[in-house]
Image (tube, grey):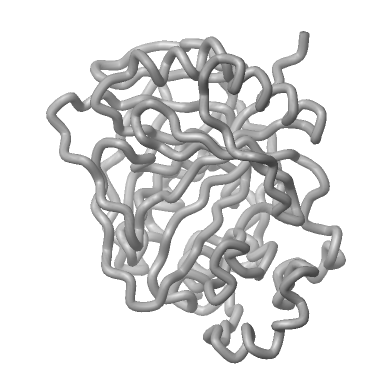
Amino acid sequence: MAPLISGIHHITALAGNAQKNVDFYTSVLGLRLVKKTINFDAPGVYHLYYGDEVGSPGSILTFFPFEGARRGTKGTGELTYTAFSIPEHSLDYWTSRLSSLGITTSTTLERFGELLIRFEDHDGMGIELVAAADDLRKGWTYGHIPQEHAILGFHSATLNLKSKELTEKLLTELMDYKFIGKEKNRFRYGIDGNPGDIIDILVDPAGRPGMQSAGTVHHIAFRTANDETQAAIQRKLMENGVQVTEVKDRNYFKSVYYREPGGVLFEIATDEPGFAIDEEKANLGEALKLPDWVEPQRAKITSSLPSLKLNPGKYD
């Protein structure tokens, strides 16, 4: 039987200034702004989606930017580092590029046989770039970053938890994940163990709880194929005592939410229908897209949102 969950769909974080957010993720990292919409639960706030050319599941990092939000803190009960996959030969390119832009990176680290660097965005959001030998996905570039060095999509995500046992049970017994390996207090899980489906649990029993605000992750979404597979995993979770929400229509996917035992908010999101349902592929992310139910309020909403300028080559 095919797994109901096939990896990471998207990761959603909180941010401060919206323009700085656009500049960092398009101009510095070279991700494509694939959708500019609103937070469906707070229509006065943008929801910005970044990813590959079409916003493929497994490439999508999204943000709710709240102007003036203070910086959050990393800690237990949070997803603390979002790792992107880059071509195996590209680590030196990215280390040099980030340094030239005044962004401090870690020294080269090694994890489960792969090399990586770690850094933060202007809000303190934890990012890692992992040089992956076996990632055949094609990265997006606006042209200012060479195609051969473009970010390919997610590699993995790190959950910082006080203990792993209950979360491990959820992942491996109900969510199709398998234990892959251990390095010190880091435990790795995957569907097939490929970039884009990997979850690490970093166990820190004495760690302080994180504080959610700008620069911290709001939730992680796992991907499932369609409405039918989502209903099946929702039913499976509920039958095993997990408190799962009703299905919520997010226009570009449908979602259910629940909180894992360590405190991180999980989501199951459908691969269908994707981001091209209301924009042509060539024009993704250009216009403010609103759900039908809020379209009559467009004038009011647009007047309350800051204007955004897309300038991918700003720092080049």
| Picture layout, residue 226 above or below residue 242 | below
Residue positioned 84% across, 65% down in the render:
278
| Picture layout, residue 281 above or below residue 84 | below
Is residue 244 toward the left or the right of residue 187 in the image?
Answer: right
Res 99 seen here: no
Residue positioned 75% across, 40% down in the render:
271
Is residue 96 toward the left or the right of residue 291 in the image?
Answer: left
What percent of the width, then of the height, locates residue 205?
17, 24
| Picture layout, residue 243 above or below residue 39 | above
What percent of the width, then of the height, locates residue 73?
24, 52
Total numbered labels placed on residues in the image: 0
Dividing the image into 4 quarters, which one contains the N terminus?
top right
What percent of the width, then of the height, locates residue 88?
52, 35
Residue positioned 61% across, 50% down in the render:
60
Camera-side residue of 71 and 266? 266
Camera-side residue of 314 and 59? 59
Q: Quadrant of residue 200?
A: top left
Q: Quadrant of residue 30?
A: bottom right
What percent of the width, then of the height, locates residue 16?
38, 71
